[in-house]
Amino acid sequence: MKKIGFVVNPIAGMGGRVGLKGTDGMAKEAIRRGGIPISAERAKLAMKGIETYAKILTCSSKMGETCLKKNFEVVYNALENTSARDTKNACREFLKREIDLLVFCGGDGTARDVYSVAGRKVPIIGIPSGVKMHSSVFAVTPTAANKIIIKFLQDDSSIIETEIMDVDEEVFRSGLMKIKLYGYAITPYEKILIQKGKEIFISADESAQKKEISSFLAPILSKGTCILGGGSTTEKIADALEIEKTLLGVDVVKDGKLIVKDACEDEILNHLNGDKKRIIVSPIGRQGFVFGRGNQQISPEVIGKVGVDNIIIVSTPHKLAQTPYLFVDTGNARLDKILSGWKSVITGFATAERKMVLSK
């Protein structure tokens, strides 16, 4: 029977809904703002039934043990207040025991920690639970991770190189994107189930197309309440209204005026009054995520209050052409299914393309 090393970052993703754009070094602040741990539940989804196919080596308590039911062995005892050091030490213990696959639950920071020890010695796969996940080592959802792990254990998957990337969170919180490539891991692969790395598209045509989109949608923001997701395309829409929005955050606009900048989930919910409510979002380049990567403030509760029919997706034609599928990973399986299917994406002035939105 094959052996899996399994480690969970207990604080991964806590900063998302409270608007922190990451939890690295900010766990106490996330808790102060009311952040709730999410990684355990996502890890449980990904590891459901895996004990049938492999013996699982893991860590004590919330770093793995509490997410499993049977056929596992605790090989590393974590500290109460866990850190990157625990993740790295656990991975060293896994490698000593000659595991066949290393599974981790977290975000890009956890991916870096795992890769710094495992390198290319063993295949690794990430269960997505961070705020931003630009590395291509992650499955698109926890359920997708479950399918990939099982296929690997049945010797029914191929292995590919995947990018380990991370954003400087201090710079990220100030509204700038600084991504660094840390190396290439090896990862079990299943088409559509493994996410692609983030890509940024910059050209004169892109800028002109964003202006077209903004001139078409700006009047919509002049009436009612609009939740404006992050990204350079939505930033152009705000520019058309002479609003200074956060490039990477979520902002609330009412009757054409900015009322909450860089909002958290609670702030968004507190301003969703009145009849006209909309969400405008742009998918992450190449990855295709509409919800669930970097905009967790737009939670299932927020979407439920606005209504799925009041979601507007925008993208430049080139970015959309380079993004085969769109994805949703809100953390609510029922909502993800509702959001799935063929959707219209605004690509210019009164122009749109149809794109498939998937939840796996």
Image (cartoon, rainbow, N blue to C red):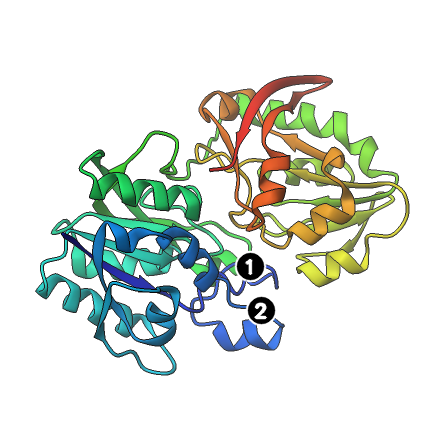
Residue 139 in view, yes or no: no
Amino acid, disc 1: Gly
Which residue is located at x 78 percent, y 39 percent?
A: 241
At which x and y percent is residue 138?
A: 36, 46
Provide the secondary structure element on which disc 1 rests: loop
The number of discs equals 2
At which x and y percent is residue 62?
A: 39, 72
Real-space CA distance between mark 1 and mark 2, rounded to the nearest whole angstrom: 8 Å
Residue at the spot of label 2: 35
Query: Earlier along the polypeptide chain: callout 1 or callout 2?
Result: 1
Residue 340 in view, yes or no: yes
On the image, which quarter does residue 357 sit in? top right
Crowd rating for badge 1 (residues with CA inside 10 Å; few <14, some 14–19, many 20+): many
Provide the secondary structure element on which disc 2 rests: loop
Q: Which label number is shown at residue 16?
A: 1
Q: Nearer the viewer, residue 130 or 78?
A: 78
Q: Is residue 43 above or below residue 60?
A: above
Which residue is located at x 33 percent, y 67 percent?
A: 64
Crowd rating for badge 2 (residues with CA inside 10 Å; few <14, some 14–19, many 20+): many
On the image, which quarter does residue 231 sit in? top right
Query: CB atoms at circles 1 and 2 under 8 Å apart?
Result: yes
